[in-house]
Amino acid sequence: MSRPWFPDVEPIVYRGPQSETPLAFRWYDPDRVVCGRRMEEQIRFAVAFWHSLAWEGSDVFGAASFPRSWNSAADPLAVARDRIDAGFELCETLGIPFFCFHDRDVTPDVGSLSETNALLDRALEHLERGMERSGRRLLWGTANLFGHPRYAAGAATNPDPEVFAFAAAQVKHCLEATHRLGGANYVLWGGREGYETLLHTDLRRELDQLGRFLVLVVEHKHRIGFPGTLLVEPKPFEPTKHQYDFDAAAVLALLQRYDLVGEVALNIEVNHATLAGHDFTHEIAYAVANGIFGSIDANRGDPRLGWDTDQFPDDPLEWALAWREILGAGGMGTGGCNFDAKLRRQSVDPVDLLHAHVGGMDAIARGLLAAEALMADGTLDRAVAERYAGWEGELGRSIRAGGLGLPDLERIVLERRLSPQPRSGGQERLENLVRRFV
Ligand SMILES: [Mn+2]
């Protein structure tokens, strides 16, 4: 493998927890079997094109700070090809099996929809060849419905139906491309599907527009026979003041209201969960409990910064608790762990991308191993079962079966002179237990 974009770096391999080599895995061991699957198949890591290839370090205060040779060609198709080649080289150097892309990370908007689509399709031919050569696979594709000024007031929720139509056409093309490339999922992130002020917003109408849009995407998925999973990615705000896909619970309400349960699942992002005021694990547990868990955007926020900092993951404890929920639900399914994470703006060297992914992969893998050990030990699961044991007794089963009304329950309390006493929840004991495995 020649490595023009990341020269002087050998493919990164597992060297064990004691290794002092900076670019080596201490915990991610792709062939190690964890809970019945090779670690690589259990986690399903993906590189994100937008943060790791397209983004060059600009922020709202300053211009691009990263010199990225793969983005330097003058012609947009040449940029796309270089960027794609660099992306596969990044995946191969890290041993990452999947990638994810937005249509506009590959090629820009060049005016009319037909010209823009034609340019994208030419770049995707190059992407397809790279997939064949490298053996890398597409975890998911998505359409960027937030960058262009036409989407300033939203895409599906725009007050102008022509913008809705344009967004629908863009998603049609990107969904078909994702299907052609064998994508395992297709993601819709709300971007600007929300509002800045209710003074000019018809909230009920916009919710109906969003529901209509999702129905159209589901219809088209079935029309073309796309076998992958459709995913919505919740986020509470930013760039809008309030997003309609605020969190897992808000998206579940949308899916129920527009009769889409069973058709659409969730792509849960760590930093979006924490911005919504939840633990990452809460969002996963809520999605699992309601049968809508799909995939993960792996990153982290900063506890003192109130925006989406999208840093690379670093906390095995957080991931151990997340993995416990995911493994309990049977694993990732079509989903995976996509690094929707970006370097800090001063990390200007391409090799910083490798260090960032290595750290993230090790944190997630270490969490997975901890979850496996925790589940094999069984103490925590037994503690939960014991806590709810009463619900398996005669009274609990009768209440759950729905055979007892309020008068029946009143009679039972009076006849049996019930006087239930508080019992310790044992939280600190269980926290100590979990830390033994992380
Ligand atoms: Mn994301």
Image (cartoon, rainbow, N blue to C red):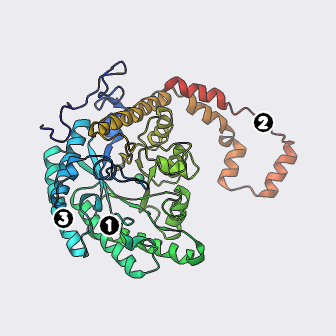
Residue to which mark 1 is pinned = 221
The disc placed on residue 121 is: 3
Which mark sits nearer the N-terminus, 3 or 1? 3
Identify the image quadrant of residue 20. Answer: top left
- In the picture of the structure, the residue carrying the numbered disc 2 is 422
Q: Give percent across and percent down for residue 300.
A: 46, 43
Find out whether the residues at labels 3 and 1 contact each other: C-beta distance under 8 Å: no
Dot 1 alpha-carbon crowd within 10 angstroms: few under 14, some 14 to 19, many 20 or more: many
Task: Specify the quadrant of the image occupied by residue 78.
Answer: bottom left
What distance separates the C-alpha of mark 3 from that of mark 2?
64 Å
Image position of 244 with respect to 92: above or below? below
* Separation of residues labelled 1 and 2 (CA atoms): 52 Å
Dot 2: element: loop
First in sequence: mark 3 or mark 2? 3
259 relative to 92, above or below: below
Q: From the top left corner, tell me how far across and down residue 227 is, in percent.
A: 29, 59
Q: Residue at x 29, y 39 (%)?
A: 349
Q: Position of residue 99 (x, y in %)?
A: 28, 49
> Which residue is located at x 47 percent, y 46 percent?
270
Check the image and report above or below for 198 versus 3. below
Q: Is residue 368 left or right of residue 377?
A: left
Judge left or right: residue 220 versus residue 136. Answer: right
